[in-house]
Image (cartoon, helix red, strand yellow):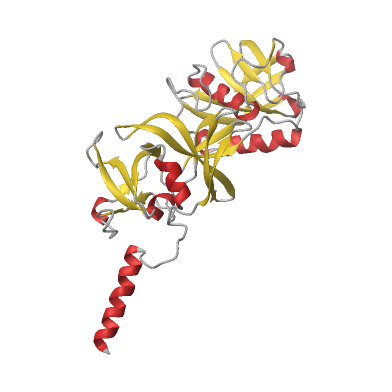
Amino acid sequence: MRRKQIIIGYAVLLAALTGWGLPQSASVLPPAVVERLTDRLPAAITPLPMSGDIKILPSFSATRPFVDRRNAVMLGEEPFSLISIAKDGRSLEMAVPVKPDAGKYTNRWFRTEEVLGKVNWKPEEYTTACQHLLYLNRGKQAVELIGALEKDTWCVSLGTVVLGKVTYRLLQVHGDYEACGVANAARLFLAREAPPVKTQAEYNTRAAELLAEHAYRQGRPWGTMKPALLTKEGAFECAAMASDFARYMFGTGLYAGEKFTDPSEVRAGDIIHFKSHFIAVVFRGKGGQLHTIEGNMNSVVNQSKTYYSVKNGKIYAGGKPQEFDYGRHNWGGKVER
């Protein structure tokens, strides 16, 4: 009896470690997903660990799914490269950085749940009906905005992921992406729809989302030669932030709005250019106070409700009149909020 219990106990332990004999779960890639991913390998990928941690733990090999804690991999800003997938969908091989050797990479195997966590899998061909914002998962930290997809971009939607209160699509976007020293045929992105705002309520909601973005938070580094995240019109520094604002809110860019030269006309949604600086006006309030966001203000992002104002046909910054060049209207919103 004692020997039988030991054998049963060993079998249960082996099943728990390897997944043998267990029903398919969120930690196993369905065959249709394996097929879609395998069709475009290698692929740049940012892990979505079920634990929400900032590191993932490799296994010793595809056939030995025991955790190798000595080689834990930290999640950073660069994506890894998905090289291959085990036939049963329970483990993935990725090229990852070798720490502390900067610029060096190696291939390691990971259990699927360590990399792709809980995804509601539903693979299907997908064409973006509007602009989509792209995000980087940062483990227990906030997801971070990293780019945008144009309307009518063809890709593959692998399923959906819920992070916090937001539901994202997990998109397989085809193209050339460099990651961990590997030339990849695709990249996996978290994405959400962001069509141009059409009503005041939509404007207010989108503006609140923009101001809350981790990438645009107050004091975030945004200095010399910082490029726009969302547009490809060659905008840098303060122009990059203004360009991102126009794209995020309206799906346009830095020079898309109706040009005006009278500072008294400034309203919500405007891009303003001074002699050598761009700012974006989120709202215009009573008394001419402007709620603004700008980049490269002392080399950081600056959000302010009081620094800029419009008085007697002039724009003031910190109480000093500015040399207004022109502005561009992107939105027919109210002057006062």
Instruction: Give the residue at x 73% y 30%.
Output: 198
Residue 65 position, x and y percent, is 29, 58
Front residue of 27/180: it is 27
Residue 209 position, x and y percent, is 61, 38
- In the picture as drawn, the residue positioned furthest to the left comes out as 101
Q: Is residue 125 above or below residue 288?
A: below
Q: Is residue 185 above or below residue 331?
A: below
Residue 334 position, x and y percent, is 77, 27
Instruction: Give the residue at x 59% y 21%.
Output: 279
Instruction: Give the residue at x 27% y 79%.
Output: 7
Instruction: Give the residue at x 46% y 23%.
Output: 227
Quarter occupied by residue 133: top right
Quarter occupied by residue 319: top right
Residue 190 position, x and y percent, is 51, 41
Horizontal arrangement in the rendering, residue 267 relative to residue 217 (left or right)? right
Front residue of 327/147: it is 147
Residue 116 visible in rendering:
yes
- What quarter of the picture does the C terminus occupy? top right
Quarter occupied by residue 318: top right
